[in-house]
Amino acid sequence: MRIEIGLENNYENKSIAWALDYPGCFAYGSEGAAAIMAFPRAFIGYKERVAALAEENWIDFDDIDVHMAESFDCYPVDAEQFPSAAGRNVTAFFKVDWNPLTVEEIDRGLEVMSWSRKDLIGLTGDLSAEQLDKELPGEKWSIRGILDHVATTELWLLDRLNILAAESTTLPEDVFRRMDATRKIFERTLVSLNGDRLVTGKDGTFWSPRKVLRRAAWHEVDHINHIFRLLNEN
């Protein structure tokens, strides 16, 4: 089976090989070739996860033919044109990102995200307040801060599409309840974008529902790995 990959280089000093048709499946590398080399193993792990957890296994093939469909080199936002985005990068918008999401793609993407959320709650739900709020050397956030960032980012991604739910102004203070609230807003909004050809430009970067789903599914997994590392180190 041919797996289309989008390669994103120079993102936070690394490259990401994205499985363009499988939200939540990606591989990192110090540069593009390393990310591509790491991808088959990442896809096998993703396939095993789908087989174990999905209501209906949508990856029913064994042979993997990895094909790099497109590559993109991130570059800094022009701070003079977009002062509010100074310090950020323009991120990849692949040709496939112009395509609207189908109901099936949305359902599968949100299902994958539900597994990650269970992993995140399982990893942090029983931590004490002291563990959640502990300041860690060299880290921007405490674990609670990371969780708050995860909740905030899903609304930030919707804002890339110029969508902001009214409920976002009255979110719960408790970080776990806030994550639950923002996830519900994200899910409901994404479902409403079925078949929508919406594409927006924000701070020098193109966004679409397909790109938002891909980056949302990646973002939580990235921070699960981050928290897991912090817990093992401390």
Image (cartoon, rainbow, N blue to C red):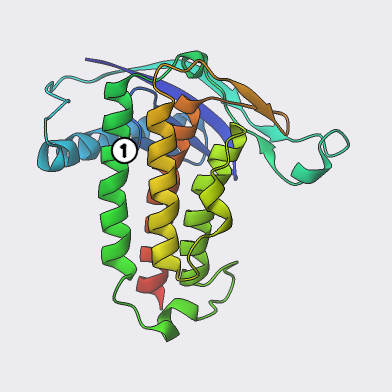
- The quarter of the rendered structure image containing the C terminus is bottom left
Image location of residue 38, percent across then percent down? 35, 36
User: Which quarter of the figure has residue 233?
Assistant: bottom left
Of residues 157 and 232, which is closer to you in this image? 157
Task: Specify whether residue 34 is in view.
Answer: no
x and y percentages locating residue 11 in the rendered image = 58, 39
In the image, what residue occupies the spot 38% across and 40% down?
187
Q: Residue at x 49, y 33 (%)?
A: 212
Give the residue number, with chain letter if any, for mark 1.
Answer: 110
Helix, strand or loop for disc 1: helix
89 or 98, nearer to the observer: 98
Residue 156 appears in the rendering? yes
For the residue carrying disc 1, how many other residues have a C-alpha within 10 Å: few (<14), some (14-19), or many (20+)? many
Q: Is residue 62 left or right of residue 180?
A: left
Question: Residue 59's spot in the image, x, y percent?
Answer: 17, 25
Residue 203 drawn at (x, y percent): 73, 34
The residue nearer to you, when weighing 214 against 46, is 214
Q: Amino acid at mark 1?
A: Leu
Query: As rendered, which of 37 and 129 lies closer to the eye?
Result: 129
Total residue callouts: 1
